[in-house]
Image: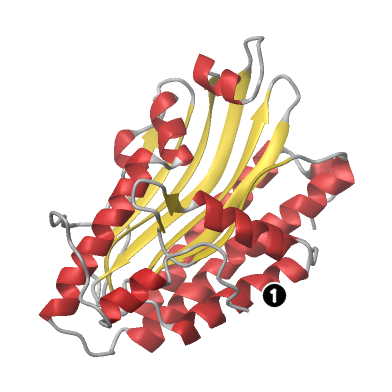
């Protein structure tokens, strides 16, 4: 039982390390073939982590489940983003996951849960889960959003509408004028007011982290045997291209990792094994691809 007195950065980091273990075990059991490879690493500026990657599974073509706990002197860019003018050290820990399936009927999924602490006294939690189907299925989208709403409502009924809208805004590709997928929840800079509030926020972050394995193993089991052909595979490669564009151009986590001299292989393990770009592509009218594009917009009330 975690109490206000024991909720240190080390305690939070240990939960994230254990979460990585449990998620990898659940994914291996659900996939039945793929096994995670563990790559422990150290950051020259302080701290390190464990990158776990999986390739060639029965369902998962490529995926990464990363844990890190890094610390050091905050860069000028980081200080500016936090409106801090004095030099400070940071401590950042969390788990980040991206999974790319073989089948275009199984969605891409991303999760990140994290804790950030500054020597200046600032600390906060962030994270979320979002889903990127290659083909948007309304029933799947409703199930996914209802699951996250239930998680949020256990802590605060205001969380889901707030964090769902935040995800819509964050996982948006401005140069394409489309969302990366169907969203989910996203939250950042959840700053505790006191020790009890910090414990409450951590309990919420724990619940979000613990929701990942049940959510994705559901889609692995339900969707992996749905039929598809070469047309659907080519569409999958195009949607992966959009995923790459967002991660490299807009994602704050990618930028933070590179700015703080993080481990490049771990930062970029979210990239798909293959992706494609077709010049001036347009989906055929009334096609399943056009239907999916029509649903890659902000503000859809799935539940």
Instruction: Depth check: give the residue in front, 149 or 180.
Output: 180
Residue drawn at the location 43% of the way across and 56% of the way down? 97
**Residue 221 location, x and y as percent?**
39, 85
Residue drawn at the location 55% of the way across and 81% of the way down? 142
From where the camera sits, is residue 129 visible?
yes
Instruction: Depth check: give the residue in front, 158 or 202.
Output: 158
Q: Residues within 10 Å of mark 1 (few under 14, many from 20)?
A: few
**Quadrant of the image containing the N terminus:** bottom right
**Quadrant of the image containing the C terminus:** bottom right
From where the camera sits, is residue 106 visible?
no
**Looking at the picture, does residue 264 appear above or below residue 63?**
above
**Looking at the picture, does residue 303 appear above or below residue 11?**
below
**Number of on-image labels:** 1
- Mark 1: secondary structure: helix
**Looking at the picture, does residue 157 appear above or below residue 255?**
below
Find disc 1 in the rendering and name its residue. 150
Residue drawn at the location 17% of the way across and 73% of the way down? 233
The residue at the far top in this view is 86
In the displayed structure image, the side of residue 291 where residue 124 appears, left or right: right
Instruction: Depth check: give the residue in front, 285 or 85.
Output: 285
**Residue 291 location, x and y as percent?**
34, 78
In the displayed structure image, the side of residue 87 where residue 180 appears, left or right: left
**Residue 157 location, x and y as percent?**
79, 67
Instruction: Depth check: give the residue in front, 58 or 137.
Output: 137
Residue drawn at the location 76% of the way across and 51% of the way down? 201
Q: How is the image coloured?
A: secondary structure
**Residue 197 location, x and y as percent?**
85, 47
């Amino acid at each position: 039982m975690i109490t206000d007195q024991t909720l240190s950065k080390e305690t939070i980091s240990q939960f994230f390390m254990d979460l990585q273990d449990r998620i990898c075990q659940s994914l291996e059991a659900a996939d039945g073939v793929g096994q995670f490879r563990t790559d422990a690493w150290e950051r020259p500026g302080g701290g390190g982590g464990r990158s776990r990657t999986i390739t060639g599974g029965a369902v998962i073509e490529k995926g990464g489940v990363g844990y890190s706990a890094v610390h050091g002197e905050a860069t000028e860019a980081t200080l500016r983003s936090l409106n801090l003018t004095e030099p400070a050290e940071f401590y950042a820990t969390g788990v980040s996951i991206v999974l790319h399936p073989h089948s275009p009927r199984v969605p891409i999924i991303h999760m990140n849960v994290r804790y950030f602490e500054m020597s200046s006294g600032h600390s906060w939690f962030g994270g979320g889960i979002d889903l990127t189907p290659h083909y948007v299925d309304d029933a799947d989208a409703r199930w996914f959003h209802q699951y996250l709403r239930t998680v949020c409502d256990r802590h605060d009924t205001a969380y889901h509408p707030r964090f769902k809208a935040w995800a819509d805004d964050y996982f948006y590709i401005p140069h394409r004028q489309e969302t990366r997928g169907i969203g989910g929840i996203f939250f950042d800079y959840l700053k505790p007011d006191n020790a009890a509030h910090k414990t409450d926020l951590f309990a919420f972050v724990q619940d979000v982290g613990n929701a990942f394995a049940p959510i994705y193993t559901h889609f692995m089991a339900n969707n992996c045997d749905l039929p598809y052909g070469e047309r659907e595979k080519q569409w999958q490669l195009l949607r992966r291209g959009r995923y790459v564009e967002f991660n490299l151009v807009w994602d704050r986590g990618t930028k933070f990792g590179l700015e703080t001299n993080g481990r490049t292989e771990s930062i970029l393990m979210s990239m798909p094994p293959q992706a494609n770009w077709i010049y001036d592509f347009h989906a055929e009218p009334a096609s399943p691809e056009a239907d999916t594009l029509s649903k890659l917009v902000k503000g859809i009330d799935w539940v």
